[in-house]
Amino acid sequence: MIFQFFNEDWLQSLDTIEEIMWFLIFYLIFLLIMAIFLSIALSFFSKARHTNFGQVFGTSFLITIAFALIFLFLGGWLGLIIALLLMWLIISVRHNIGIVAAIIVSVLAFLIYILVAIVIGVLIGTTLIVLPF
């Protein structure tokens, strides 16, 4: 097929209701974690609006849907660049901050996530995250 949009192996892994429900549960947990760290990063900007958890959760949901749709049709560096630009636009528009502040918020949220993962890993004595550097 010329226009094969979906990875067939991934789609075949969701063949029962139980597997679909587990996927949705993990997606919800991912959204909650993403919203927590995005909310913490947004709290550093005093001019950011709509910083309550429900609206930050909505922003996280929009970001993940945008990433999924972009990577569904585009791959590689072009898809990543478009997804990042769209993520920064979503953050800047929904929270009334500039593009530069949206970039800082996303980098800060990622760094806080890395820091928390390292601290939790040290506390429980395992490696939760492997950094490439």
Image (cartoon, helix red, strand yellow):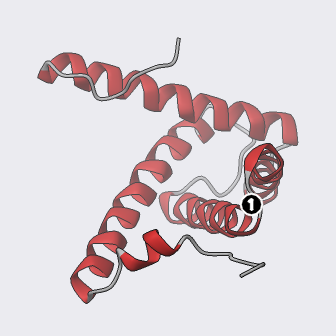
Residue 89 visible, this orientation? yes
- 34 to 44, vertically: above or below: below
**Disc 1 residue crowd, few under 14, some 14–19, many 20+, Cα 10 Å:** some
Look at the numbered disc 1 and give the secondary structure of its residue: helix
Residue 45 visible, this orientation? no
- 19 to 27, vertically: above or below: below
Residue 23 placement, left or right of 63: left
For the N terminus, the quadrant is bottom right
Q: Residue at x 39, y 78 (%)?
A: 12
Q: Position of residue 66 (x, y in %)?
A: 69, 65
Q: Residue at x 58, y 64 (%)?
A: 55
Q: Residue at x 78, y 43 (%)?
A: 77
Residue 62 placement, left or right of 119: right
Out of 124 and 131, give the one closest to the viewer. Answer: 131
- 41 to 92, vertically: above or below: above
For disc 1, the marked residue is: 94
Out of 53 and 13, give the one closest to the viewer. Answer: 13
